[in-house]
Amino acid sequence: MAVLKYEEIAESLRARIAAGEIAPGGTIPSGRELAEQWEVSRATAIKAVDVLRNDGVVVAKQGTGFVVTDTPVARPAGARRAGSARILGGMPFLRVGEPDWAEPPARVAATLGLSPGVKALRRVRVLQLPDGTPNSCVEAWFPPEVAEVSPRLADTAPIAEGTTRYVRRQTGRGPAEGVDVTTVRGASETEAERLGVPEGTPVAVLLHTAYDEQGRPLVCEEGVTPSSLFEQVDTYAM
């Protein structure tokens, strides 16, 4: 899939931020400056900035422009449909503990094609509503062949250029297909604690798996959302 010009500009800015060229609190070039540098319209330049803003990489600061923020933002598990994932943005989140190697649940292990006893790298986050209350908790599991060559996945610091782009650069593999499976059950003790709800509260569980062009899994995310906060909307031709 061809990369659109505004995506190329956004990726270039992400790379500069990830490299420390533009540190947290630093200002990115204005829309006018980007338009001149890249020889594109201001509308295209502004769209590139909007991608970073919606992803929480930059925030608007009156009288200054857009500055780099160290507040992490992520999307809920799943719903990365083509044409929407780069624009819709995400939600503020809190990292839970530190990334660790653990044996994933049987359902996740089967999806990743891991034998019993094989560990994967786990990253846990709790996405927040505007008032700071939990919206959902997400456990992301990376298979060994991805995690072992992508050391920054084991860091607690946000990955400024985005996990997908980082993994693509480290492995040469990118997502070509996503599979989302939604089920309903009661919240476990750990999930209830993370979400601030009673154990056994009905929750929607969305298992999202990203596969590369060869059909190999890159990551499996299990997102858990209280039923009172879960909504899925599908639009399709009839």
Image (tube, rainbow, N blue to C red):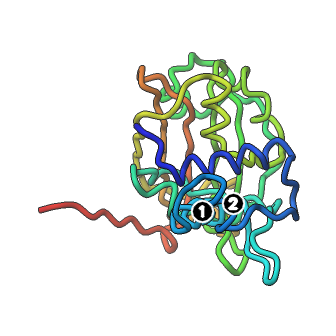
Mark 1, secondary structure of its residue: loop
Q: Quadrant of the N terminus?
A: top left
Q: Which residue is mark 1?
A: 90
- Tell me the amino acid under the disc marked 1: Gly
First in sequence: mark 2 or mark 1? Answer: 2
| Residue positioned 55% across, 30% down in the render | 218
Q: Which residue is mark 2?
A: 73
Q: Is residue 193 visible?
A: no
Using residue 168 as the reference point, say whether residue 216 is left or right of it.
Answer: left
Rendered location of residue 238, percent (x, y): 11, 62
**Relative vertical location of residue 150 with respect to residue 53 in this rendering, above or below:** above
| Residue positioned 77% across, 46% down in the render | 16
Q: Nearer the viewer, residue 50 or 55?
A: 50
| Residue positioned 65% across, 29% down in the render | 169
Mark 2, secondary structure of its residue: strand
Q: Nearer the viewer, residue 104 or 233?
A: 233
